[in-house]
Amino acid sequence: MVFGIKIPSRQPDRGAWVRGTQKEIACECWFTSTGRTIPLMLKIEDEDGQIQTIREIKVHSQEKKMYAGVPSIEYDCTLSAWNREIRVWLIYYQTESRWVLRVP
């Protein structure tokens, strides 16, 4: 016989990987006194090998997630770059201190 109190012991896992095209980026961010992370600027390498700087980031929402046991924070954003607005997700892998940009 097994007894439980139906309280999850940890955050549910979202799966083995993040879907969509991912690209490694450098991101300048602000860490608040409460531990919240706010992306301010990012740098990304384009197809020609040039480093592009994007400073206009509009964050719509953020959500803590877990992929294959790795904690991350996923930001739903709109970037203003290359004379257009691009909807992307910025993902911060906390244990690795690593940022990726995901395009749906």
Image (cartoon, rainbow, N blue to C red):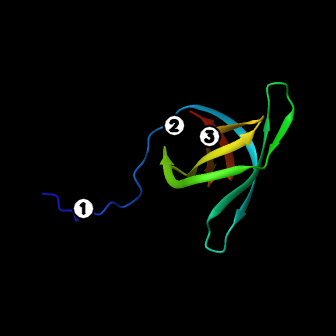
Of the pair 98 and 81, the residue shown nearer to us: 81
Check disc 2 and report its element: helix, strand or loop.
Answer: loop
Eye-nearest disc, 3 or 1: 3
Rounded to the nearest angstrom, the CA distance separating label 3 from label 2 is 17 Å
Q: Are marks 3 and 2 in contact (CB under 8 Å)?
A: no
Q: Residue furthest left?
A: 1
Q: Is residue 83 above or below residue 40?
A: above
**Residue at which label 1 appears:** 6
Question: For residue 89, which numbered disc appears in the image?
Answer: none
Which quadrant holds residue 1?
A: bottom left
Of the pair 7 and 3, the residue shown nearer to us: 7
Rounded to the nearest angstrom, the CA distance separating label 3 from label 1 is 36 Å
**Residue at which label 3 appears:** 88
Q: Is residue 92 left or right of residue 24?
A: left
Q: Is residue 40 above or below residue 84?
A: below
Q: Is residue 52 above or below residue 8?
A: above
Residue visible at 61% across and 47% down?
A: 77
Residue visible at 57% across and 52% down?
A: 60
Q: Residues within 10 Å of mark 1 (few under 14, many from 20)?
A: few
- Residue 83's spot in the image, x, y percent? 77, 35
Q: Is residue 11 visible?
A: yes
- Residue 98's spot in the image, x, y percent? 69, 48
* Three-letter amino acid code of the residue under disc 3: Val
**Residue at which label 2 appears:** 17
Question: How many badges with numbers are in the image?
Answer: 3
Rounded to the nearest angstrom, the CA distance separating label 2 from label 1 is 27 Å
Which quadrant holds residue 53?
A: top right
Question: Which mark sits nearer the N-terminus, 3 or 1?
Answer: 1
Q: Are marks 3 and 1 in contact (CB under 8 Å)?
A: no
Q: Residue furthest front?
A: 83
